[in-house]
């Protein structure tokens, strides 16, 4: 085994993250930097890697506009969120060959939304046995691929899918 650590999760799991002013999803739509986790952009929404992933390839589809609920989306935004969710499924299937994919929206803090003020759709690739003792006992996920490598793997697949439509 090369390594058994997820250094980007340390601040998150230890509770020492610095509170950010503003919205992480709104801030993410500013011009992406070279190490951006955005892997696909639409006109009203974008696809970004989860900074604290449950599995490799954990994506989120996010409307650009700061809105908390599905009913708050315009028809155009709702359509693009659905389209990017569908494209994300195709890209994850091609890139990782998962045995399944969890797709979910948590509306509100009580429903499990970590960032409940800004709607986002999670897509988490799944495989039989992908949770193990580290997850159950250590409350830690072990991911074999770092986030920037995941972004580099997925961007060309999104680009190819978008250009073929």
Image (tube, rainbow, N blue to C red):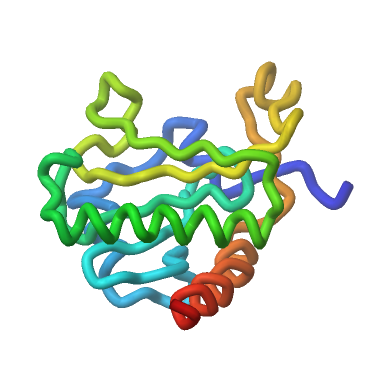
Image spot of residue 48 (x, y percent)? 42, 59
| Residue 147 to residue 152: above or below | above
Count of numbered circles on the image: 0
Q: From the viewer's perspective, is 33 left or right of 44? A: right
The residue nearer to you, when weighing 117 against 11, is 117
| Residue 141 to residue 30: above or below | above
- The residue positioned 52% from the left and 37% from the top of the image is 102
Q: Is the C terminus in the top left, top right, bottom left or bottom right quadrant?
A: bottom left
Image spot of residue 16 (x, y percent)? 42, 36
The residue nearer to you, when weighing 19 against 35, is 35
- The residue positioned 48% from the left and 45% from the top of the image is 123
- The residue positioned 47% from the left and 50% from the top of the image is 51
Image spot of residue 98 (x, y percent)? 68, 46
Image spot of residue 91 (x, y percent)? 56, 61
Furthest residue to the right? Answer: 1
Q: From the viewer's perspective, is 90 left or right of 2? A: left
Furthest residue to the bottom? Answer: 163
The residue nearer to you, when weighing 14 against 136, is 136
Q: From the viewer's perspective, is 124 left or right of 40? A: right
| Residue 29 to residue 5: above or below | below
């Amino acid at each position: 085994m090369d390594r058994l650590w997820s250094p980007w999760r340390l601040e998150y799991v230890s509770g020492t993250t610095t509170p950010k002013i503003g919205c992480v999803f709104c801030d993410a739509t500013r011009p992406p930097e070279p190490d951006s986790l955005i892997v696909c952009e639409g006109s009203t929404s974008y696809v970004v890697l989860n900074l604290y992933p449950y599995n490799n390839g954990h994506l989120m589809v996010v409307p650009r506009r700061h809105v908390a609920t599905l009913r708050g989306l315009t028809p155009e935004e709702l359509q693009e969120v659905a389209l990017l969710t569908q494209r994300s499924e195709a890209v994850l299937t091609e890139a990782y060959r998962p045995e399944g994919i969890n797709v979910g929206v948590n509306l509100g803090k009580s429903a499990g939304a970590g960032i409940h003020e800004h709607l986002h759709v999670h897509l988490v690739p799944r495989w039989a046995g992908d949770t193990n003792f580290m997850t159950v006992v250590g409350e830690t996920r072990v991911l074999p691929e770092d986030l920037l490598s995941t972004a580099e793997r997925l961007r060309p697949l999104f680009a190819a899918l978008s250009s073929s439509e």
